[in-house]
Amino acid sequence: MKGTKILVVDDEENIRLLYKEELEEEGYDVELASNGLEAFEKAKENDFDLIVMDIKMPVMDGIQALNEIKKVKKDQPIILCSAYGEFKQDFSSWVSDAYVVKSADTDELKRTIKDLLNVK
Amino acid sequence: MNPVEILGKIIEISHSNLEANSRISAILNIISQEMGFEEVIVFTYEKDKRLTSSYMNRKSTLFKIFSAYRCHIGEGIIGSVAQKRMPQSFTKRDVPLRLGCLFYPELDDHLERFKSFLFQPITDDSFLYGVLFLASASKELIQDHEKILTSIIAREIGGVLQVHKLHVSSKRKINELATLSELGKLLTSHVELPLLFQTIGLIVTKATEATFFTIRLEHKFLLNGPERFSYGDVEPFIKDYILKLENEVWIQKKTLSIRNIMPVLPEMLNGYAIYSTPIISRDGVIGTVTICGTKNRMGFTFEEDGQGLINNIANYITNGVENTILTSKLRELIKELNKAQKRAIEQEKLKSLGEMTANIAHEIKNPLVVIGGFANRLLKKAKLTHGESRYAEIIVKEVARLESILNVVLRFAKEDESAPCKPCNINACLDEIVYLFNADPGWEKVQIEKEYDCNLPPVVCDIEQVKQVIINIMLNAYEAMFGEGKIHIKTGRCEKEPDRFLTISITDTGGGIDPAIIDNIFNPFFTTKEKGTGLGLAISNKIINNLRGKIEIINKVGQGATFSVYLPLKNGDYKEELI
C-alpha cells in the first residue's frame, strides 16, 4: 500500500482535509488539488495511481478535467466523487472508472479505491 | 221593410262589432222574418271539402236533419250549388227527393210543408264559403228580385265568414307563436334535460289541449337518463299504438298520424288524434315527439293544423336537445380542462419546488459530508471518553439521516431514469415484499392476506421503483395500524376502455385517513409522522405517474384505507403473453 499515490481534487478545503486524513490512514500517499486545471497540470507531470475528482469546481470542472487527463493519459484511473448522483446519467462522465456519491461515510469511496487498485 | 231597408239593416249588422256567429244568426233571422222564409240555413265549406250546416234562423226545423250528415261537394243540390257556384231554385213540384242527397231520409217527412226552395252559393270572386239555403211554406214561386236580394245577402254573409275565418286562423297562429316562443325561451335557458322535457310537455299540452305528450330519445343522447319523457296520461291500450306509430316515424323520418299507418282504425281509437314526428339532428333521427288527444275537444288544434305545429315543436326540441347535449359535453370538457390546468399548475409548482430543493440540497451536501466525515474520524479516536464518543456517534447518525433525506429529495427533484423498464411479474414482486415483511419481527402482529389474479400479464415497468412504491404504501399502512392489524393485497385487471390497467390494491385496517388531510397526502413534505420526510407518497405518486399509471385511494373512515396502484397494460404485451 505504501507508495500508492492518490490525487484528491476538491474545491472545498475541509473535504480535501477529510479525504487526505482518511486515505492517509489507509496508507496511501495523498496529494491535493483545488480545481480541475490544477489537477490536470499535476496529473500531466506526475504519475498517480489514482485520482479522486470532485465535479463542481471553479476554473475547470471535474468532468472537463477528467476528459483532458484521459486525453493525455488514457489509462489514468479516475474516480468521480460528487455530491450529486445525477451526473451518473451525463455521458461525459462515463469515461471515468468509477462514480461515487460523496458521503460522510467514506467506506464506499475507500472500497472503490481498493477495487480499482486491485484490478490494476 | 222594403228590400232596400232589409239590405240596409243587414249591412249594418254585418259591419257591427258583434261576434261572427251572432251577426250571421241575426242576418238569417231578418231574412226569415222580413222575406217570409221559414228555413234559412248556412252551410259552410270546410277544409275536407264537405259542407256543414253551421248557422240557422231561430225557427228552423230542418237544421237538425242537416246536422246529421255533411254532404260532399257536388253531392245533392247543396253540393252541386257549391260546386258550380250557381244559384238554384225549386218549387214543391220540381224539387228532387231529399234535396238530391240520400243521406237525409228524415227530410221525407218535412219537405212536404214547403212550397219553394232557393239555394244561393256564398262566394266572393275567388273563394267559396258555403251555401245559403232558403225554404218558404207560403211562396208558390220565388221572384227574381228575391233571388237578386238573397244573392247580395249571400255575398254579405260571405264577407262575414271570410273575416271570421281569418280571425280564427290568426288566433290559432298567435296561439302557436305564443307556444313556440315559450318553447324558445325554455330551450335557450340552460335547464337540465329531464326538467326541460317536462316543461315542454306542460307547454305543448296546454297549447294544444292534448291529453298526452311524450318524447322518446335514443339512449346515448340522454347521458344515462331515462329513454322517455311523458306528460299527461293516456289509457294503456293507446300506448301500444303510440309505440307502433313512433317506430314507423323513426323509419319514415316524417310526421305521421295514426291514420297514416292504420287505414282502418280500431273502434277504440275513434275520437282520438295521435301525431308523431321525428327529432332529426345532424346524426339522423335521435327521437320522436308524440302528442295524443281527443278530437272533439274545443280548440284542439292539431286535427287540422296540428301537423305543422307538431313539426315546429319537433324542430324546436331538436335544437334544444342538441344544445343541451352540446352544453353538457362542453361542461365535461371544461371540467377536464380545469383538471388538466390544476395538474399543470401542480406540476409547475413541483418543478420549481424541485429545482429549489435541489439547489438547497446541493449547498447542504458538502458541509454535511465534512461534519459527518470528521465526526466519524473523531469517533475512531481511542482517547474519547464514553460521553464524548456518544456525542460523536449522535453527530454521525444524524448526519447519516440528513444525508438520506437529501438523497430522497434529490431523487425526487430530478427525473430519475435509472433502470430501464422491462416486463415484470407483479405477483412475484409482491411475494418478495411480503416475504421481507413477514421475516421482520416488528411485523409479527400484522397479518398479510394475498388475493392474486393468477392470470396477470407481465407489466412493463422498473420493478425496483414499483417495489419502492409498494413498500412505501405498506409502511404507511403499518404505521396507520400502529403495527397491529390486517393488510390485504389484491391484484387484478381494470379494463375500462380505452385504457387497460393492472391493479394492485392494498387495504389496511388502520381506521382510514383523516378526510381533512386526504387532499394533501401526495404533496411533497406533507407528513403526519414525527420522523417522516413527507416525501414517501409524493415520490410514489411521481414514480407511478412516470409509468403513466395512477394511485387511487378509497378511504373508509373508521375502517381503513385502500391504496390502488394502476399500472398501464399495453395491447402489445398482452398479445405477447398470449403467444
Image: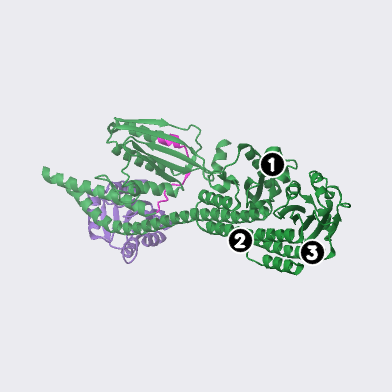
Chain colours: A purple, B green
Q: Earlier in the sequence, mark 3 or mark 1?
A: 3
Chain hosting mark 2: B
Describe the element under mark 3 as helix, strand or loop: helix
Q: Are marks 3 and 2 on the same chain?
A: yes
Question: In which chain is the residue bearing label 3?
Answer: B
* Mark 1 crowd level (few <14, some 14–19, many ≥20, 10 Å Cα): few
Residue position marked by numbered label 1 in the rendering: B270
In the image, what residue occupies the spot 70% across and 38% down? B267
Residue drawn 85% across the image and 56% down it: B140
Q: Which numbered circle lies on residue A77?
A: none
Magenta extent: B415-430
Return the residue at label 3.
B151
Can residue B276 be seen at all in this image of the molecule?
yes
Inter-mark Cα distance, 3 to 1? 40 Å
Q: Amino acid at mark 1?
A: Asn
Q: Compare residues B515 and A112 and report the one nearer the observer.
A: B515
Residue B213 among magenta residues: no
Q: Nearer the viewer, residue B441 or A115?
A: B441
